[in-house]
Each structure stands twice: as C-alpha cells, then as structure tokens.
Image (spheres, rainbow, N blue to C red):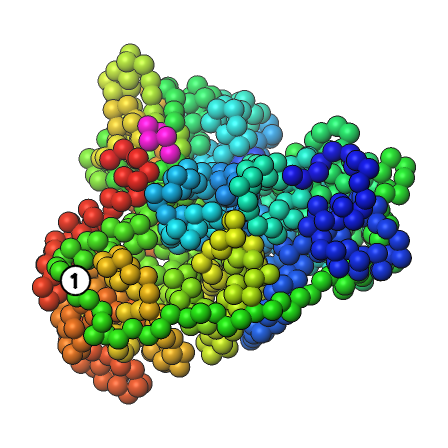
C-alpha cells in the first residue's frame, strides 16, 4: 500500500524500501547528502529514481538507437520528439504507456494515458492533430478481459473525443500473455512552427515559476513508483495511485497553453506528468543548470491540509508548470482567467543548484539537483541470450482440411477480426483534416497539415508473437512494418517513437529480450534511416512472476508532400491486375495461419531483410508518387490472401488469385514473408510495371485479378459478403453489442 | 456582397475551427469567431454557427450550460430578427436547450459514442440551408456523438412533421432518433439543428463534399435576399 498519511515512526530506510528504493540506492542518497533525507526528500528521490522516470535498466541500451537525422529537430530527452516537415513547420510526437493504471482502473487509466501524451506534445508548442493507440488485452475468455476492453475503449474515446483530437489509427491484440497485464500505449502527433518550439530547461535565474491548470489533489500519489513494480494478487489495492482525468480541463489547458505561448511570455514550460510537481520542477531547473525554490502554500489545492509530500508526489492531471519571462505574469493571468484556469506564481529560479521547498514557513526539502539526475542509478542488468524458436521445415507445415474454413477461422479470430466496435467509439474526423483512418482502408492514418497540400501519415506497429519467438528479428520487424505501412500510403517515413513494454528487467531472460529487441530495432532504424526521436519504457509488466510477451511498440510518422499522391487498399478497381511486390520463400513460423488454424504457436518468425525492405519499399513509394498506382496494401498478418481480401472488402470488388510460386497453396496463401506489397494496376500497364520492377531489382509477379464479388484462390471460394460477415461478427458478439 | 458568418466559441467547443474553415472554403465568405461571454454579435451576419464539441464538458446535460451563456441571448434575438442559425452536433443540443428548436437529444440507444460516415436523405429542400440539394437527395456526412438520439413528445413530433420541419432524415437510424430525424428547423425556417457534420464533409478528400452544398445554399439564399 502507498503511504499517504503522516509518517509513523519508522526508519527512513524502511520508507525507502516501501517507496521502491533498493538498499544500495538508498545508500547512494545517504552518501550524496551526507545525512539522512527527510520524508519529503525521500519521496522526491524515490520517484526521480523510479524506473519510470530514470530509465535505469534501459538507458544503457537505449543509446544504441540512432537519434539524429536530416529532419530531426529534437530527439529523445525532451517531452516529445520534433521533426522538420518543411516550410518552417514541425511535427512533434510521442507514444507512452499507461499499462499499470489501465489494468487497475481501465477507464481512468486509459483516459489519463491519452491526456498525458497530449500534454507531452502541446507542452512543446504543438497543437495535437492525431491520436493513435496500441492495445494488448488478455485472452477473450479470461474473466477480466471484457470489462477491461469496455473500460479502456470508453476511456480513450471519452477523453480524446471531448478534447477534440481525432483518433485515426491503432492496433489491438488479444493474448493470454496479457491476462495479468494489459498494455495501453497512446500516441499523440502535433503540429507547430519550427521556430516556435518550447523546451523545458529554465534559461536564467530570477524568473517566476507559474503553476496553471487543475488544482492538486491526493490522486495518483506515487503513480510512477507503482508503474515501476510488478503486480501481485493485491494490485487492486493500488487503485488510489491511479489518476482521474478531466478532458474538459485538458481542452481548456491546450487552448490556454498555446495562447500563452503566442504572447511570447513563456521562457520554459513542462507539463506535470509522472511524478507531478517533483519531476517537472527538478527537470526544468536541472536541465537549465539552475536552482529552484517553490512555496508549496501557493500551490492551488483541491483538498484541505495536503502535506508537502502529497503535493510533490501527486499526479493530479491537467497541470502545467511554466517559467515566464521577466515581468510577464500579467500576460499569463489574462490567459488563465479567460480559460477559467487556476494559476499561481509558486516559485522562482535561482543559481543555487538546489531544489528548496517551503511549506507553512518551514523548509521541507533542500536537495542538490545534480544527484537527482546525474547520480540516478544506471544498471547494466545481467542478461542471457533469449531462447529463440527454431526454423520450421516447410514440409512440416500442415495443410488445412479445407481452405475456406481455414480462411474464415483466421479472419474471425480475435486478433484478425474487424475492430469496428472499438474505433466507431473514437471521433476520427474532428479537425476536418482526416484523409485516412481506421475505417477507410489504408495502411496508415493520414491527416492533412492544416491549410497545406501536405499530410502526415501515422501508424503504430508491433507483432508480439514474433518478438517472443525471436526478440532480435521481432524488434527489426516492428520497425520495418511501421516503415512499410507509411510507405504503402505513399508517405516518406521520417522517424519513430518507441514504447518498449517488457516484464521485469531483474530477470536475465527478460533483460535478454529487452537487449536483443533493442538491437534489432536499432539495426532496422539505421538501415531504413528511421531515427528514434522520443519514447517510453514500461518494465515490470508482470503479475505473480509471469511476464507479458515482449512488446516494443513502434509509433511512426511519415510525410506526404502532396496528398494527391496517396494510396490505399480501398481503391482497387474491377479489371485491375494484382501484382505481388517482394519475394515469397514461405515464412510460416509464428504465423497467424499456424496459430488460428492449427493451434500452433511456434517457429522462427519471418526474417527481415532490411536491404530488400528498403529496395522494395522505395520502389512502391515511387510508384505511388508517380501515380502509377493508387491501390496498395502491405502484406503482414495472414499473408497474401488476407491482404487481397482486405483490399477486396475495402474496395468492394472480388479478387481471383493464383499461385505461380511453386510453393504449396496454403503456404503461398498465408506465409508472412516481409518486405511485400500488393498493388493493383490496369491490365495495360502491368507489363511496363513489371519491367520497371525488374530494372530496380525488385521481385514482382502477377498473382491475380480484381473481378466479381468473390474471393477465389486454389480450392478457396467465398463471397465477399460472407467474408465480411465473418470478419465483422466476433468483436460485437464478444462485447454483447446489439446486432 | 461578401457572405458574413459568425462561429460561436464556448469553453469545450472543438468544431469551431472546422466550422469556420468549412464556411470559408464553401462560400468564400468571412467568418468571425465570437466568444461565449460576448454580449454583441458582429453586424450584418448572414449566418450564425453554433459548433460541435463538448461545451462546458457536457458535464451537466449536453448544451444546457452553453444555452445560458451571454452570447446565446444575442443569438436568440438574432434568430427572431430572421438571421439564419445552424447548430451542429453539440450546437444542435444547445439550440434545443435554448428553446430555439423543439425536442431534445438523448443518449444514443446503443449507449455508446458513435463515429461513422452516415447517409442522409434531404427531406426538405425548400429551405435556405438545403436549396442546393435535389429533392430527396441522398447525401453523406460523418457523425460523431454520444447524445444524438432526438426525442420529442407525440404532439410535437406531429407538428414537426406537419410543418415540414424535418430537413434531414437518417437512411439507417444509428441512434434511435424519433422518426429517423437527423436535422430539423424551426417553423420560420431560419434555425436548423443537425447531428451529422456538414463541417466535416466539405471537400472530396474528407470522404464527402456534400456538406459544402449546405453552406453554398446559405450563400445563395443571402445573395437572393440581397
């Protein structure tokens, strides 16, 4: 249980353990201070040194990521990453997890996840323009799953819809590996002028520190610590550590923050997220190489008699901390009053290099800032090479008894079935710039850059079963698939944000997954010139010693310079020929086919050849930009036949496929070889296109024709309407929705 | 003349910019944003738009608090003078709460927020808002709300139907709205409320430009009147 009441006479060492500090970590604090910390100071140390805030287990390995590039304006380390999208405009984005809270309190956990990630983006001066989410739930039959799905989806919608930012893309998986720990990863993408980006470092001493937004209450106290620990049976008792969101307050906060920034009064700004007032004030002063004093009596408070400890550790939502330029307080108050927000000057920057807090006339905390960040623990955790699934022999892959039944089983499975029930609860069109969303038949969401011909393409990707089977290849695949999805709509992939969800880093096997997945991701980022500009690490996703499947989610952003040159899988036309771009050797390990048709979760995942990925992707993107094709779909879960039927369903036209490969029919149909796309072209231009592919060294072959109203392949023959019915039925039926 | 419109802004409005852009691009007109606490509207307006969103967080009853804001008193007066007023989504709820339109919007019968493109039938094309549509035309717009279920008592519904006040009807009723009503006007014909968003359907790349016809109709009405 979290201690929120006045301290009882326990030793500080006892409290340190309670707050999640290891004995040797506590010893470092004693050494640095040369004395015992008091209760408030201990609280400050414990949240700043939590896994969530300090990245102590992952920092060493995160250094492997490429973080610079021609378009990178600001890489990891700020609230969000910033990329150049030409014409003096910038895109600011980040993905962050809210896993632990969403399991304990699904609605508020998910809602505040959305709110928190939006604040990270508008804190830097961007107007949020798109939201995405990556959700991993337990198996459908688990007693908690349905309630969690209901709450998480309602929470995401309830928050994003009210604030008025479209939720344009996402992904959803169900697997028993998440029974005890769901994953809710939310991503926000914003737009700003490249010369009006705001940072958190305090620039000079003597400036007023202004608190604005909602009042501080006793919610979410020690949330960052809770998120840095495993769950046990009594995790429900952690409910008080979950924050409560108010999307209306967030909407006012966005408008007020952007308006305040436009006045020119802001010198530095930081939202109060994890670890609330503690991390925002420590980071702002620390990054600026300054010191800070705060008078906690001035903090707007929702409840009476809050202690200094509670105020510093509260994670009440919708709060900001700004450092204003000299004498600009009046600009601030004018804006805050207009938007009806609480605000107060609560402190000042100085040159002390310390954080000094006063409360009721007493100094309650006086710490040097340097140790809080510089001496934060950094662990080279022991790890072992993760066990990887062996390659399967193609001859050992069983054929289905019946191709029709196999296909229906796949497309009606929880992972593959339509997620319409979810995304129809998300406003996907507010802001009136949505070109592509979950409903339109595109591999990535697309929003116009307001008032221009440019558009941003956004996607979120990870295939946890691949990462579990081989963390290195799976890590590569997560990055490659995101790159491919952006490519498939015609965008130039620019950069990614990563959301690394794993179990306990204190277990060498899990640490091995972390290390090798990062290795794979980093290699893919380098080869595809796809730097990491922001990210979040969520560890200790395990319950009673059982870890989640390793899930390093990749959120990615691409740029279309002219959205008239865009593609989707919704524009296939009757009479068009289907070309398969990319080679098929028959990668069946850890495939959807094996899992859903034969109940086998085994085998090495598809190998990712990054050279082929780049070459094939660049070729397809060039086809789109030259308007040679508009009907494009990447091949992923379920392989060729699934991709073809998704194209057919979205375009309302049947597809006749053939197997020119020499592989067995079920293998060619459902293999999950990477670096592949399906494109639709007019019969007359197919020949020229094949020649263009040959010239570029890109494997390409004719595999079918758009015609009629059925899906036909080898022994398979099903009407699109029966496929659609099977595809759409599972989730509403599971959630008990009226049909 | 240039078409002149005002879009109201309440705390929590989130389609205010969408409405401004939709009107500007559809009509080439000028749009002023009017803050909820303002006690005067710009002079010479051809249209007042009450936009969608979550005014005051929808925390009391959708539109209830906004209907009591200072600017709404001015909107009521302007409507009485004959100025055209359109309320979209939350704006429709506000117009009902302010008494400019009959009935009320209740929670969808699915009990969920519903966001999807939706087909409407133009039920009355003899209005300032719809004269650009063909009689009975099928149009597509998107819808996004949790409280779009139009209700009214039987007498009110009979009157609405009898007076030709129903302007748009759902082809497939998504939320339980009485008589499939998606949009309706006052008896005078200058105040329209609708749940679907013409302000998200004004350019083909948004999936439909059928909403632009509504704003163009208002432009033509203004030109004819001038």
Q: Is residue A711 above or below residue A393?
A: above
Q: Secondary structure at mark 1?
A: loop
Q: Looking at this view, is A196 or B149 the one in front?
A: B149
- Does the segment drawn in magenta span residue A499? no
Q: Residue at x 34, y 43 (%)?
A: A141
Please provide percent x and percent y for residue A725.
Answer: 19, 46
Q: Quadrant of residue A633?
A: bottom left
User: Quick check: can you spot residue A688?
Assistant: yes
Please provide percent x and percent y for residue B4.
Answer: 46, 39
Category of crowding for the residue at label 1, using alpha-carbon neighbours closer than 10 angstroms: few (below 14), some (14–19), many (at least 20): some
For the N terminus of chain B, give its image quadrant.
top left
Q: Residue at x 52, y 59 (%)?
A: A502
Is A81 on the left or on the right of B133, as rendered? right
- Does the segment drawn in magenta span residue B109? yes
Q: Looking at this view, is A16 or B188 the one in front?
A: A16
Q: Residue at x 37, y 19 (%)?
A: B102
Q: Is residue A155 above or below residue A374?
A: above
Please provide percent x and percent y for residue A247.
Answer: 55, 38
Chain identity of mark 1 = A
- Highlighted magenta segment, given as a residue range: B108-112
Q: Residue at x 38, y 79 (%)?
A: A609
For the C terminus of chain B, give its image quadrant.
top left
User: Quick check: can you spot residue A707?
Assistant: no
Residue, disc 1: A400
Q: Looking at this view, is A507 or A674 the one in front?
A: A507
Q: Looking at this view, is A399 or A667 the one in front?
A: A399
Please provide percent x and percent y for residue A134.
Answer: 44, 53
Is B99 on the left or on the right of A438, as rendered? right
Q: Is residue B221 above or below residue A418?
A: above
């Amino acid at each position: 249980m979290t201690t929120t009441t006045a301290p009882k006479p326990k030793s500080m060492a006892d409290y340190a353990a309670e707050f999640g500090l290891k004995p040797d970590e506590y010893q470092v604090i004693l050494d640095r201070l040369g004395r015992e910390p008091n209760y408030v100071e201990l609280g400050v140390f414990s949240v700043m040194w939590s896994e969530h805030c300090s990245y102590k287990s992952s920092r060493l390995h995160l250094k492997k990521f490429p973080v610079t590039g021609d378009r990178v304006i600001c890489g990891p380390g700020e609230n969000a990453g910033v990329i150049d999208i030409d014409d003096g405009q910038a895109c600011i984005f980040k993905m962050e997890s809210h896993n632990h809270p969403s399991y304990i309190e699904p609605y508020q956990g998910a809602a505040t996840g959305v709110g928190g990630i939006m604040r990270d983006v508008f804190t830097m001066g961007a107007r949020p323009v798109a939201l995405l989410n990556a959700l991993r739930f337990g198996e459908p039959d688990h007693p908690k799953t349905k309630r969690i799905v209901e709450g998480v989806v309602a929470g995401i919608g309830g928050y994003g819809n009210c604030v008025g930012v479209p939720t344009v893309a996402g992904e959803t998986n169900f697997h028993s590996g998440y029974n005890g720990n769901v994953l809710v990863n939310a991503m926000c993408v914003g737009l700003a002028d490249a010369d009006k980006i705001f940072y958190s470092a305090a620039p000079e001493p003597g400036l007023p520190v202004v608190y604005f937004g909602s009042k501080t209450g006793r919610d979410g106290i020690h949330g960052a610590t809770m998120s840095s620990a495993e769950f046990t049976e009594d995790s429900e008792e952690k409910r008080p550590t979950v924050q409560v969101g108010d999307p209306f307050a967030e909407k006012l906060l966005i408008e007020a923050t952007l308006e305040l920034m436009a006045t020119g009064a802001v010198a530095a700004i930081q939202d109060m997220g994890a670890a609330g007032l503690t991390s925002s004030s420590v980071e702002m002063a620390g990054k600026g190489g300054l010191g800070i004093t705060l008078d906690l009596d001035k903090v707007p408070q929702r409840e009476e008699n809050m202690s200094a400890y509670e105020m510093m550790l509260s994670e009440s939502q919708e709060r900001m901390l700004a450092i204003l330029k000299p004498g600009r307080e009046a600009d601030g108050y004018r804006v805050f009053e207009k938007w009806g927000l609480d605000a107060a000057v609560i402190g000042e920057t100085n040159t002390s290099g310390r954080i000094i807090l006063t409360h009721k006339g007493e100094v309650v905390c006086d710490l040097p800032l340097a140790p809080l960040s510089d001496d934060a623990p950094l662990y080279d955790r022991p790890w072992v090479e993760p066990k990887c699934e062996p390659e399967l022999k193609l001859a050992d892959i069983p054929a289905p008894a019946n191709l029709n039944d196999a296909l229906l089983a796949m497309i009606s499975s929880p992972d593959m079935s339509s997620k319409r029930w979810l995304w129809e609860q998300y406003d996907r069109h507010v802001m009136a710039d949505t070109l592509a969303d979950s409903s339109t038949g595109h591999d990535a969401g697309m929003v116009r850059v307001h008032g221009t011909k440019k558009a941003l393409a956004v996607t979120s990707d990870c295939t946890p079963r691949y990462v579990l089977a081989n963390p290195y290849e799976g890590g590569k695949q997560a990055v490659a698939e995101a790159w491919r999805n952006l490519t498939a709509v015609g965008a130039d992939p620019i950069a990614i944000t990563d959301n690394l969800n794993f179990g306990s880093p204190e277990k060498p096997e899990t640490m091995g997954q972390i290390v090798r997945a990062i290795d794979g991701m980093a290699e893919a980022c380098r080869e595809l010139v796809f730097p990491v500009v922001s990210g979040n690490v969520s560890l200790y996703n395990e319950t009673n010693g059982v870890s989640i499947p390793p899930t390093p989610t990749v959120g990615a952003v691409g740029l279309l310079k002219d959205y008239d040159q865009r593609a989707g899988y919704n524009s296939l036309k009757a009479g068009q020929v289907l070309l398969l771009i990319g080679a098929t050797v028959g990668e069946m390990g850890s495939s959807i086919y094996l899992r859903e048709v034969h109940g086998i979760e085994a085998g090495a995942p598809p190998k990712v050849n990054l050279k082929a990925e780049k070459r094939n992707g660049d070729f397809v993107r060039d086809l789109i930009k030259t308007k040679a094709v508009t009907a494009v779909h990447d091949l992923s879960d379920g392989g060729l036949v699934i991709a073809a039927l998704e194209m057919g369903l979205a375009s309302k036209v049947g597809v006749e496929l053939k197997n020119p490969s020499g592989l067995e029919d079920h293998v060619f149909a459902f293999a999950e070889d990477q670096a592949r796309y399906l494109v639709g072209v007019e019969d007359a231009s197919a020949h020229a296109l094949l020649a263009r592919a040959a010239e570029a060294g890109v494997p390409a072959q004719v595999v079918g024709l758009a015609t009629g109203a059925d899906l036909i392949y080898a022994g398979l023959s099903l009407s699109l309407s029966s496929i659609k019915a099977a595809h759409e039925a599972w989730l509403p039926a599971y959630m008990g929705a009226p049909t | 003349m240039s078409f002149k419109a005002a879009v109201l802004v309440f705390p929590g409005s989130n389609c205010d910019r969408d409405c401004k852009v939709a009107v500007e691009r559809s009509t080439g007109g000028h749009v002023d944003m009017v803050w909820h606490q303002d006690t005067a509207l710009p002079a010479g307006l051809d249209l007042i738009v009450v936009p969608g969103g979550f005014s005051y967080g929808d925390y009391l009853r959708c539109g209830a608090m906004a209907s009591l804001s200072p600017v709404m008193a001015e909107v009521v007066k302007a409507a009485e003078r004959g100025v055209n007023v359109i309320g979209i989504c939350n704006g429709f709820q506000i117009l009902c709460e302010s008494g400019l339109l009959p009935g009320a919007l209740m929670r969808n019968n699915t009990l969920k927020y519903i966001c999807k493109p939706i087909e409407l039938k133009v039920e009355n094309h003899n209005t300032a808002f719809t004269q650009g549509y063909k009689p009975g035309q099928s149009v597509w717009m998107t819808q996004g709300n949790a409280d779009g279920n139009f209700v009214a008592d039987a007498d009110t519904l009979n009157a609405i139907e009898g007076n030709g006040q129903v302007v748009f009807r759902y082809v497939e009723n998504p939320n339980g709205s009485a008589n499939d009503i998606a949009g309706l006007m006052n008896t005078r014909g200058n105040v329209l409320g609708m749940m679907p968003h013409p302000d998200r359907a004004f350019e083909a790349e948004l999936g439909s430009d059928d909403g632009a016809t509504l704003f163009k109709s208002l432009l033509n009405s203004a030109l004819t009147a001038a």
